Image (cartoon, rainbow, N blue to C red):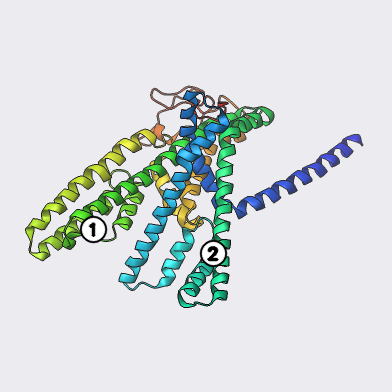
Amino acid sequence: MERDREFGRRIAVGSIVAALFLLVAHVALSFLGVLVFAVFLYYAVRPIYRALDRFNVPRRPRAILALVLFGVPFLVLITYTIAIIVIETQALLEAYNVQDQFLDEVITDIDVTGLDLDEIRRIVTDLSSQASLGVVVLSLGGTVSLVSGAVVQLIIMVTLVYYMLIDGPRFVSWALETYDESGVMRAYARAVDPELSMTLFGNIVNVFVTAIVGVVTFYTYNFFAPAAVDVPFPALIGALTGIGSLIPVVGIKLVYVPVIVLLAANAWAAGDLSLLVPVGALAAVSAVLVDFIPDFFIRAHISGKQTHTGMLLVSYIVGPLVFGFYGLFLAPILLILVINAVYILLPYVLTGQPSGVRQARLTEYRDGRPEVSSVEGTEAPGAERTEAEPAVSSEGPSDHR
């Protein structure tokens, strides 16, 4: 009888906990884009935060410095880049008489803050077509409301990143020590954390670095080149080179090589072969600055090691189509979580053994045959580490610095 009462009390308490968790999940879904981008910004800022530890700076000043030196400027740069891309995309679509509905859908997809685009359009229209004081006041009020909403979400994002930097490792360590008796979740966290860091900070930053280099290169070229061989929509082309960098080796070439061919064709059609000189210079500079350096140097140092490149590429493509702009960050996160769950958590679920169970990785298969010894717990030469003993990253969740 006493056991039944205790079980009933546990059910009641569990129901309260479940209701609270559901409420928190509902709130989190309302700010899903902000939360996803906060996770990305955390992994982007964390190397700066960790580097400042060499100067014996306390945790809180370190987090503030990391956000001020890198986080906020990075947000401003992304916002400016998106604005330029939208403007040039609109000009491109208008040049080819593409319907505005398509542009509206694109802008809606990349709208991270969830602003009311119809309200923005109405405010701009009223300000440009009406001169009455009442209309101006109402329009300015709407503008203030929209801007304040964006500022609030920016504050939420920066605050989340700040506390993830100073308290995130302690919270994860506390949760693992308290609830992870088997140790399997610790192995999972140690595998996921460095891969998320390298994938989000590496591949995404590589996209933005390549895009910025491309935009600067094409704008600089247009400043010196004759008008007949100008790069059309340089900001858009530069952004596309960044997106193309997600495809190793050939992705960037799929963007700038057709542009070079088009410019060479324009020079040939103009009948002035001297125009081929700046076009050739652009080809050489693009091959070195836009293509070779980012793809072979930056990617080699900061890209993920365990996640399959093809699956990661598919996630980058599918993510924005399914979730909108923030899907560019959410889909790789989900991919890494799922892959490591299959490697680490699923064997534990199937066998009930937290250690000694090894899930073979795709890279260990050659010609359809696994290069793994038949003896349990052993590996063939050259095989990767077991998930029971994951490598401890210097940026792992157990770091208390």
Query: Residue 123, relative to residue 188: is it above or below?
Result: below
**Element under disc 1:** loop
Residue tagged 1? 231
Left or right: 296, with 113 as reference point: left
The x, y position of residue 108, in whole percent, is 48, 62
**Can you say which quadrant of the picture contains the C terminus?**
top right
**Can you say which quadrant of the picture contains the N terminus?**
top right
The x, y position of residue 40, in whole percent, is 49, 43
Q: Point out the frontmost of discs 1 and 2.
A: 2
The x, y position of residue 218, in whole percent, is 26, 53
Q: Is residue 228 visible?
A: yes
Mark 1: few/some/many CA within 10 Å (<14, 14-19, 20+):
many
Residue tagged 2? 143
The x, y position of residue 115, in whole percent, is 54, 61
Question: Tag on residue 315?
Answer: none
Q: Is residue 339 visible?
A: no
Outermost residue toward the right? 1
